[in-house]
Amino acid sequence: MHSHFLFQAFVYLAAAAIAVPVAKRLGLGSVLGYLLAGAVIGPNVLGLVGGRTEGSVMHFAEFGVVMLLFLIGLELKPSLLWRLRVPILGMGSAQVLLTTGAVLAIGLLAGLPARPSLALGLILAMSSTAIVLQSLQERNWLKLRGGQASFSVLLFQDLAVIPIIALLPLLATTKTSAVTGHSGLLEGLSAWGKTGVVLLAVGAVVAGGQLLARPVFRFIAGARLPEVFTAFALMLVIGIALLMQTVGLSPALGAFLAGVVLAESEYRHELEGDIEPFKGLLLGLFFLSVGSAIDFPFIHDHLGLVVGGALGVVVLKFLVLVTVSIVFRRQWSDTLLFGFALAQVGEFAFVLLGLSERLGVLPPDWTRAAMAVTALSMTATPPLLLLLHKLPRVRAGGDADRAMDSIEPEVPGRVILAGFGRMGNIIGRFLQANGVPTTVLDVDAELVDGVRKVGLKAWYGDASRLDMLRAAGADQAEVLILTLSDTTKIRAIGELARKHFPHLKILARSRRRVDAYELINAGFEHVYRETLGTSLDMGVDALQLVGFRAYHARRAAFAFRKHNEASMRELASHWGGQNYFNVLRAKIEEAESILRGGGAVLKDQVDAAWDNEPLREEAAKGTLRR
Amino acid sequence: MPKRVLILFAHPALEKSRVNRYLAGAVQNIPGVTFNDLYEVYPDFQIDVAREQELLLAHDVVVLQHPFYWYSSPAILKEWQDLVLEHGFAYGTDGTALRGKVLLNVITTAGPQEAYRPEGYNRFTMRHLLSPFEQTASLCGMRYLAPLTVHRALSLASLRDVEPHALLYRRAIESLIDGSLDLEAATRAERLNDVLPAPDAIVASGTATGAL
Ligand SMILES: Cc1cc2nc3c(=O)[nH]c(=O)nc-3n(C[C@H](O)[C@H](O)[C@H](O)COP(=O)(O)O)c2cc1C
């Protein structure tokens, strides 16, 4: 058993590792890669893994969807969710009702019985959250208005699954013992009681997120062990999923809700970074198992029915979606994206079809055909989106829309500020005061807490982690400021950032002169000695207090600074070499001669300005003309 | 009622000045004079517009004292004009704050007076070269007086050489304060020096000057 598990894991991972890069290179997107790989390792081609019978894998894999929705929730502020209420409720209900109605009508026209037709309609109305969101996210299309509409409708469908599951037993034509999904705990309760418990659970998630999350996070972050935080993040998502399942809600929906609640927490980026890899793997597994579930023998035997059915369903759903989009006055490019994205039948259909069969709502051969149609339509989605991508008009329209109505909660920080100690504090407030969006990262949870109170955007997290930098928006940011006290760490982060985000301009703090040498020699252009500015400020004031003119003192400081900077860079290039001490000695002598007033370098720069002596000599000679 | 005089003083390297610092010393302590040392107050060029406008409102005569640098003023005075003489304050429909006030340049030059003539090597008269100031005053509704000039400033070797000019300057300020200056004549003249009593006469009447 144990080795069997390892073997399976190896097969899945190997399939992903081979198929996904190839699919991506071919421009097909990762989802299609996973699906195809799944089909290849599935029971009908290589037979390395079982098909849908292997329910546990599917179950496990569905958790990827839960995490996906948690992550999407994290990126959605409640205020944005509120703005999406029209597409969610309006477009969502219109889509589900119209699709169901259309399938029912076709069924009745074809002389099929009403109840199974209605059940089939409800089931086929669902689209695939996993495939759509992953594909849209991969192309950055979630930010487009068409993408937002798609997302909204998917959210509504997630909500709609609950009443649909409740409705299915009522549609049973043959009497079977009622099988209610998984709401074991609520069996004995009345409808009101169930509603109450559901509301209570949702309330618990919201309240917990608002009140408990911060102190708990802080306590855990206090341990300063990244893996503990990861464990906690996973526990959180799993716990919410369990809770939701117990009360009969969709775990994905619950996770989404929790994500939204935590969207404004300072731990958001850390959570994102921790969950992201798990989501990716599990979602991949999910697509693999969908691929392996494609029932090739059945398709082969009923080629006309399955292919025709899939084509018919996709076209029907597409038409419904386009109609809805037009009714809601969407632009043509948004409408196309919306239609193409949601035209498939989703993974919920697998669950609902299985349930229907057990309840006797649908005859077994219907469900088998519908499952094949579902798998096929899901596989068709990535190519459809690829097709859409090739339509130049849509892309152009999409880009023009992009600036507005972004699904992202805020403008990504133009500056990332790692380290919010005494230095970072001043820089952060200065940037803030000038309206430059700044994202602050620090590993001191308490500090981050305080920073947030002042109204700055701050996140708990370790900037030396690549995922953390990415989550903080390094892809879009322009400047990365490193003010940590540890030069080794600054260098490490700087080098990491330079490698992965070469567009970032990096500003690095150095504490001592040798730190500055190290950073300069490591190729960092903008290196700041922390004491230089303040020391010169004091020097300027001292000059003034002993009688220098203010303007002269300023200019002297500028000149000094310039000279000092240049000599530091020169010394840096000798640092560690044989010659360093010779150069240093020369520099010291030079500095001394400046101090003695004899050195030409500095005095000239300052004193040559507005000098009248040469003029006076000429005037005395009477030659001051042209 | 005595008039109040605001002196906007601009010299970027006063430690090297010979003439302007004595001229300044001659006037800065006269009652009714506010001496505003721009390079000292704003060494970073961050001019406090509100403060400067309040100063303008509180005075009747504005004196710009500075060495002649490239036929104009040192840089900070330009910065001052650009920032302080705002639309809506100094000019424009609502910009009436400076109406009726007096503007005077007090200038030291290296070139001799003869050079500032069409035939001279500087080719233009001082009034020509100062026309941007004159027109600025005009737009702000101010009366522009002929400049008080000290030529051959670099040839004034000793305190004794500078003293007559310092006294003349002092005299000009005093007559502006007590209203004894003939503003009409001062407006029309080529130099303000010409409508004031000759330096010797002032020396005779005697107030000596301290250094800045
Ligand atoms: C940058 C600079 C520009 C100058 N331009 C002129 C000029 O255009 N015409 C002129 O007569 N003198 C010019 N001079 C000479 C100054 O007017 C002269 O040095 C000054 O009036 C002396 O006064 P002070 O001793 O108070 O500095 C210039 C001097 C400097 C330093």
Image (spheres, rainbow, N blue to C red):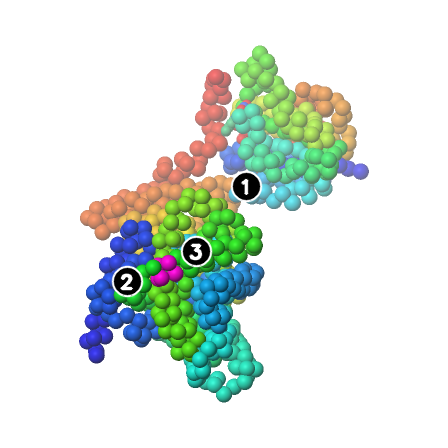
> Where does residue A498 sit, x and y in percent of width and height?
32, 52
A491 lies above or below B162: below
Mark 2 and mark 3: Cα distance apart in space: 22 Å
Furthest residue to the bottom? A188
**Which mark is on residue A300?**
2
Classify 10 Å Cα crowding around label 2: few (below 14), some (14-19), many (20 and above).
few
Q: Quadrant of residue B133?
A: top right
Whether discs 2 and 1 lie on one chain: the answer is no
Same chain letter for marks 3 and 1: no
Along the line of sight, which residue is nearer the eye, B143 or B83?
A: B83
- Residue A386, visible in the rendered structure: yes
Q: What element carries label 2?
A: helix
Subunit of mark 2?
A: A
Query: Label 3: how many residues lie within 10 Å, few (<14), some (14-19) or many (20+)?
Result: some
Residue A315's disc number: 3
Taking the image as shown, residue A187 lies to the left or right of residue B27, namely left
> Which of pointers 2 and 3 lies earlier in the amino acid sequence?
2
Residue labelled with disc 1: B45
- Which chain is indicated by disc 3? A
For discs 3 and 1, the disc positioned in front in the rendered view: 3
> Of the residues shown, which amino acid type is indicated by label 2?
His
Magenta segment range? Answer: A305-309
Q: Quadrant of residue A290?
A: bottom left
Numbered disc 1: secondary structure: loop
